Amino acid sequence: MKKVTLKIDGMMCGMCEAHVSDAIRKAADVQKVTASHTDGTAEVICDDSVDVEVLKAAVEKDGYKVLDVAQEEYEKKGLFAKLFKK
């Protein structure tokens, strides 16, 4: 799994966050999306096979601008993750 952080220009309110999150969910099979207009970011938890360009295109087709993309390994935290770690 990986965490992709998109730096996004153009989100102004909670409705923008919802639009960005919905666009990402429709474009790719993701585990979790958290968008923040105050931070100007969307954090996406997804499988390693998800193409970052697909995520970018989904956001930009709705009129927002992706300024930067960062990726890092993601490991679930918490008791369940520890019990069922492979």
Image: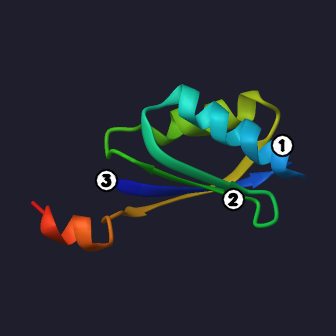
Q: How crowded is mark 2: few (under 14 residues within 10 Å), some or many (20 or more)?
A: many
Left or right: where 66 falls relative to 6: right
| Distance from the alpha carbon under mark 1 to that under mark 2 | 14 Å
Q: Position of residue 65 (x, y in %)?
A: 77, 44
Residue picked out by circle 3? 1
Give the mark nearest the N terminus, 3 or 1: 3
Nearer-the-camera pick, 18 or 70: 18
**For the image shown, how many numbered marks are present on the structure?**
3
- Going 49% across and 42% down the picture, which residue do you hit? 52
Left or right: where 83 falls relative to 71: left
Give the mark nearest the N terminus, 3 or 2: 3
Which amino acid type corresponds to the residue marked 2 in the rendered image?
Thr
| Distance from the alpha carbon under mark 3 to that under mark 1 | 28 Å
Which amino acid type corresponds to the residue marked 1 in the rendered image?
Met
Image quadrant in which you'd find residue 5: bottom right
Q: Given contact means CB atoms under 8 Å apart, are the residues at marks 3 and 1 in contact?
A: no
- Going 37% across and 55% down the picture, which residue do you hit? 2
Secondary structure, mark 2, is strand
Image quadrant in which you'd find residue 79: bottom left
Give the numbered dot on residue 15. Answer: 1
Of badges 3 and 1, the one in the foreground is 1
Residue picked out by circle 2? 41
Q: Residues within 10 Å of mark 1 (few under 14, many from 20)?
A: few
| Distance from the alpha carbon under mark 3 to that under mark 2 | 19 Å
Left or right: where 33 falls relative to 62: left
Q: Position of residue 29 (x, y in %)?
A: 42, 33
Which amino acid type corresponds to the residue marked 3 in the rendered image?
Met
Give the numbered dot on residue 76. Answer: none
- Going 56% across and 49% down the picture, which residue do you hit? 33
- Going 48% across and 31% down the picture, which residue do you hit? 28
Give the mark nearest the N terminus, 1 or 2: 1
- 45 vs 63: above or below: below
